[in-house]
Image: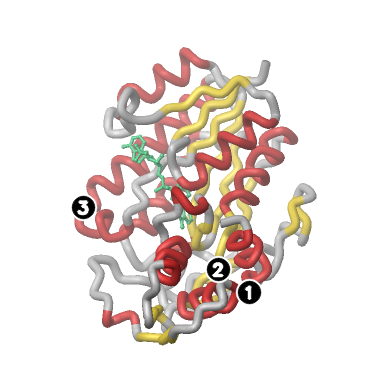
């Protein structure tokens, strides 16, 4: 039976990847806390060498953008050095490695949208650490890797979505009379469920290379909040605000929108819609 090793299986994307791997009938092994901590870098390679997976989905990361800014050494350990170990060990056992990166590798050029030919220019340590994570994958798994850059990920549903969409829906359901959302930063959204299916389908056919994977069009948090308000029939006010009213440790890109010049609309039969189509679909399942 095909052995699949998933890191970050408890995360937003990991939950969907786990479900997609189960649907394929794979033998699934997870690497995660408390037993397996990526901080213990020296334990990673022996773990992979013992399991000998044919597919590794490396989804775990230090994803707290502001924490990475305050503690770049932590970002480097988890997002760069641990990724290097995963890549080396996956290659040693002859496996295929799927690594999920982020639109945060872009932003300094203030370009509206970035494709796979654009050179990364991150504005914060999270983005830099994910970029150097990509480099580790390229260097240590040169012929057996897929790197997929995702936009602002949506997923998790009612019980697990503690990110932007989940917070806005919670505010509406809790009867907030006003919702504030930033209107001076643009990005793309990625439905985590679609991305998980794309990763599994890619693993099956051994797809390699670098791909951007996001819904079509760029969007601000304010536009996302308006779309949620509209679909939930919210009668309060959604107000666009400048990002500087929410002081954060890490700078954010003015625009980190991504698009793909390599993927067609229906990659692996997975329909990639416009941002509002994909957002509506997610809200309807919430
Ligand atoms: N969320 C986004 O908007 C977004 C956008 C683009 C790309 N990405 C990338 O997509 C991937 C998945 O993101 P996500 O949103 O699903 O992340 P998430 O919900 O924040 O989950 C992170 C996962 O990494 C694990 N992890 C973190 N530190 C660890 C450590 N020291 N040892 C072992 N496991 C550790 C967490 O385990 P615990 O449960 O133990 O904390 C969790 O399973 C990441 O590589 C991220 O960089 C995310």
Ligand 1's quadrant is: top left
Height in image: 85 above or below 135? Answer: above
Which secondary structure lies at badge 3? loop
Give the x, y percent position of residue 67: 25, 55
Q: Which residue is mark 1?
A: 217
Q: Residues within 10 Å of mark 3 (few under 14, many from 20)?
A: few
- Whether label 3 lies within 8 Å of ligand 1 gets the answer no
Q: Residues within 10 Å of mark 1 (few under 14, many from 20)?
A: some
Quadrant of the drawing holding the N terminus: top right
- Is residue 22 left or right of 135 when viewed as pictured? right
Q: Looking at this rendering, what residue extends furthest in the top direction?
A: 50
The reply to whether discs 2 and 3 touch (Cβ–Cβ < 8 Å) is no
Q: Residues within 10 Å of mark 2 (few under 14, many from 20)?
A: many
Q: Quadrant of residue 68?
A: bottom left
Label 1, label 2: how many angstroms apart (C-alpha)?
7 Å
Residue beneath the point at 32% across and 58% down: 65
Label 2, label 3: how many angstroms apart (C-alpha)?
26 Å
Q: Which residue is mark 2?
A: 188
Nearer-N-terminus badge (3/1) = 3
Q: Which residue is mark 3?
A: 71
Q: Quadrant of residue 204?
A: top right
Height in image: 199 above or below 211? Answer: above
Residue beneath the point at 49% across and 70% down: 256
- Whether label 2 lies within 8 Å of ligand 1 gets the answer no
Q: Which coloring applies here? A: secondary structure
Q: Nearer the viewer, residue 127 or 153?
A: 153
């Amino acid at each position: 039976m095909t052995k699949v090793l998933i890191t970050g299986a408890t995360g937003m994307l990991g939950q969907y990847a786990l479900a997609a791997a189960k649907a394929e009938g794979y033998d699934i092994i997870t690497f995660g806390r408390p037993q397996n901590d990526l901080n213990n870098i020296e334990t990673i390679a022996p773990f992979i060498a013992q399991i000998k997976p044919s597919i590794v989905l490396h989804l775990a990361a230090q994803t707290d953008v502001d924490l990475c800014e305050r503690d770049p050494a932590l970002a480097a350990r988890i997002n760069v050095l641990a990724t290097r170990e995963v890549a080396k060990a996956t290659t040693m056992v002859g496996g295929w490695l799927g690594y999920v990166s982020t639109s945060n590798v872009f932003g300094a050029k203030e370009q509206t949208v970035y494709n796979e030919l654009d050179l990364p220019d991150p504005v914060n340590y999270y983005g830099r650490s994910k970029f150097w994570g990509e480099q580790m994958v390229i260097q240590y798994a040169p012929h057996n890797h897929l790197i997929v850059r995702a936009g602002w990920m949506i997923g998790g549903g009612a019980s697990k979505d503690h990110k932007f969409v989940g917070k806005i829906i919670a505010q509406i359901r809790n009867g907030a009379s006003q919702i504030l959302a930033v209107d001076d930063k643009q990005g793309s959204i990625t439905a985590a469920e679609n991305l998980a299916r794309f990763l599994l389908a890619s693993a099956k056919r051994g797809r390699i290379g670098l791909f951007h994977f996001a819904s079509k069009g760029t969007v601000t948090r304010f536009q996302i909040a308006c779309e949620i308000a509209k679909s939930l029939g919210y009668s309060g006010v959604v107000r666009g605000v400048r990002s500087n009213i929410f002081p954060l440790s890490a700078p954010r890109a003015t625009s980190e929108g991504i698009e793909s010049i390599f993927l067609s609309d229906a990659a692996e039969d997975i329909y990639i819609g416009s941002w509002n189509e994909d957002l509506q679909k997610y809200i309807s399942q919430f």
